[in-house]
C-alpha cells in the first residue's frame, strides 16, 4: 500500500528530508496496546516499540506515540520494529485524563475531520456536542455532526432536533443516518475524501462501531446493545484503531467517552462560543466574569432571550473546568520545581551522590 493512501503528503516528505530520516522506514501507527504499537508501512503491518532515548526524553504523555502518528522506524524482522522518531503533528485531539486531574489523554493525532456522533434517542445532548466542538476547534480539526438511530423517531422529531442544533451551533454540517435502514448514508459517503483522516467522538452505545462497519464496507468492529439495567452503552471498542475505508479515507474509532473533560482549550472555547465572546466585548468591565456584574452584555442578552440560556450555562461550566485544569497544572509544575531544587541542593551537599 502506498503511503499516500494512508495520508502521507508533501509536508511530511519535507520533514523527512530536513531531519535526514531517509534511511528509516516511514509508517503510521494504527493501534496502541500499552506502549506496544501496531504500525502500517508500505510493506504491511508490524508491532513496534519506542527507543530508550525517546522514552527518557519524554516529558509528558504527549511526547509518546499515539494512534494516527507518522513515525520513522527500523524494522528488525517481518513482525517487529523500533520507533526512532515521531513526525510533527498537524493536529492533536486530547482531553483531561479521567481520574487524573491535570493530566492529558491523547485521543488521536493528525486528524482532518471529527465525526461527533450522537443517537437521537437517549443520548442526544447539545451541551455534550459543544464540548466535542471545543475539543475539535482547540485541535484544529473540522467537526461534522452525525445523528444516528433516526429509525427510532419520526421525520418531524428529526427535523426538530436538527433545527435545535443549528440554532446553537452554526456552520457545522449535520448528517442524520440510520444504521439499520442505511437512510442518510449516501450523503455521508459523498463527503469522505481519499487520504483524509477522520475520527469518531461519542458516548458508548450511540452506534459508532456499526457506523464504522457500514462506512468501511465490512465488519471490522464488534457491535453491542444498550444495557437493559443501566440504559447506558457498553464499551464495545476497547482501544483506538485506524481503519482504511472502502472509499479510501481513514477512520479512527475510539472507546466511548462518558466524560469529556476540558483541558487547555482557550481558543476552542472562543470558537465554539463565538457569540458569547462577541457580546463580552460590549460588557462594562473588561474583566467581566458574566456571572453577576452590572452592565454585563452577556447576561443581558440571556435575559432578553437573544442568547440561549443552556449554551450560556454550558460555557460557564467549561470555563470553570478550564481554569481548574490550568490551576492544577500550575500547582504540579510548582511542586516539581521545588522537588528539583531539593535534589539539586542535596547533590551539592553530597558530591559523592552525583
Image: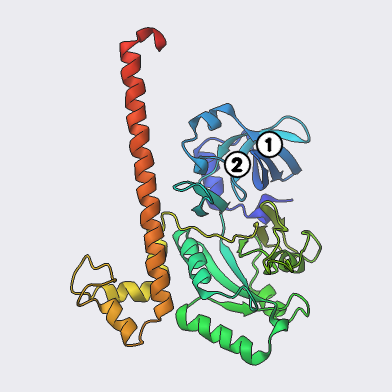
Which dot marks residue 71? 2
Query: Separation of disc 2 and disc 1 at Cα?
Result: 10 Å
- Give the secondary structure at mark 1: strand
Q: Closer to the observer: label 2 or label 1?
A: 1
Q: Nearest the camera: 63 or 260?
A: 260
Q: Nearest the camera: 51 or 345?
A: 345
Residue in view at x 77 percent, y 59 percent: 221
- Mark 2 or 1 closer to N-term? 1
Does the image show residue 179?
yes
Q: Nearest the camera: 285 or 8?
A: 285
Rendered image coloring scheme:
rainbow
Residue 224, image x and y in percent?
A: 76, 64
- Give the secondary structure at mark 2: strand
Q: Nearest the camera: 326 or 175?
A: 326
**Quadrant into which the C terminus falls:** top left
Residue 38, image x and y in percent?
A: 70, 43
Q: Residues within 10 Å of mark 1 (few under 14, many from 20)?
A: many
Residue in view at x 47 percent, y 46 percent: 103
Residue in view at x 46 percent, y 36 percent: 59
Q: Is residue 52 above or below residue 282?
A: above
Quadrant in which residue 333 is drawn:
top left
Q: Is residue 272 above or below residue 350?
A: below
Query: Where is mark 1, residue-wise?
Result: 48
Residue 353, image x and y in percent?
A: 41, 11
Query: Do the CB atoms of the residues marked 2 and 1 lie less than 8 Å apart?
Result: yes
Quadrant in which residue 35 is drawn:
top right
Amino acid at each position: 500500500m502506498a503511503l499516500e493512501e494512508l495520508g502521507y503528503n508533501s509536508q511530511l516528505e519535507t520533514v523527512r528530508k530536513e531531519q535526514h530520516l531517509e534511511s528509516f522506514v516511514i509508517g503510521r501507527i494504527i493501534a496502541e496496546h500499552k506502549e506496544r504499537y501496531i504500525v502500517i508501512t508500505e510493506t504491511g503491518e508490524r508491532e513496534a516499540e519506542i527507543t530508550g532515548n525517546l522514552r527518557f526524553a519524554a516529558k509528558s504523555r504527549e511526547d509518546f506515540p499515539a494512534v494516527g502518528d507518522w513515525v520513522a522506524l527500523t524494522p528488525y524482522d517481518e513482525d517487529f520494529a523500533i520507533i526512532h522518531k515521531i513526525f510533527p503533528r498537524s493536529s492533536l485531539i486530547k482531553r483531561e485524563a479521567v481520574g487524573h486531574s491535570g493530566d492529558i489523554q491523547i485521543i488521536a493525532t493528525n486528524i482532518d475531520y471529527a465525526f461527533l456522533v450522537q443517537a437521537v434517542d437517549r443520548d442526544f445532548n447539545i451541551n455534550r456536542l459543544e464540548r466535542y466542538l471545543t475539543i475539535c476547534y482547540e485541535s484544529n480539526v473540522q467537526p461534522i455532526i452525525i445523528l444516528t438511530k433516526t429509525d427510532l423517531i419520526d421525520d418531524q422529531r428529526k427535523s426538530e432536533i436538527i433545527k435545535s442544533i443549528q440554532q446553537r451551533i452554526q456552520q457545522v454540517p449535520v448528517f442524520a443516518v440510520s444504521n439499520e435502514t442505511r437512510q442518510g448514508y449516501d450523503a455521508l459517503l459523498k463527503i469522505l475524501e481519499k487520504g483524509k483522516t477522520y475520527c469518531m467522538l461519542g458516548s458508548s452505545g450511540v452506534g459508532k462501531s456499526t457506523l464504522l462497519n457500514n462506512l468501511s464496507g465490512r465488519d471490522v468492529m464488534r457491535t453491542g446493545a444498550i444495557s437493559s439495567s443501566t440504559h447506558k452503552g457498553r464499551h464495545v471498542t476497547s482501544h483506538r484503531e485506524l481503519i482504511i475505508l472502502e472509499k479510501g479515507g481513514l477512520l479512527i474509532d475510539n472507546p466511548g467517552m462518558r466524560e469529556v473533560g476540558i483541558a487547555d482549550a482557550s481558543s476552542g472555547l472562543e470558537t465554539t462560543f463565538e457569540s458569547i465572546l462577541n457580546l463580552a466585548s460590549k460588557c462594562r468591565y473588561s474583566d467581566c466574569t458574566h456571572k453577576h456584574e452590572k452592565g454585563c452584555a452577556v447576561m443581558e442578552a440571556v435575559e432578553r432571550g437573544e442568547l440561549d440560556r443552556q449554551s450560556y450555562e454550558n460555557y460557564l461550566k467549561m470555563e470553570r473546568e478550564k481554569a481548574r485544569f490550568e490551576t492544577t497544572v500550575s500547582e504540579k509544575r510548582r511542586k516539581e520545581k521545588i522537588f528539583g531544587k531539593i535534589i539539586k541542593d542535596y547533590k551539592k551537599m553530597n558530591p559523592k551522590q552525583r
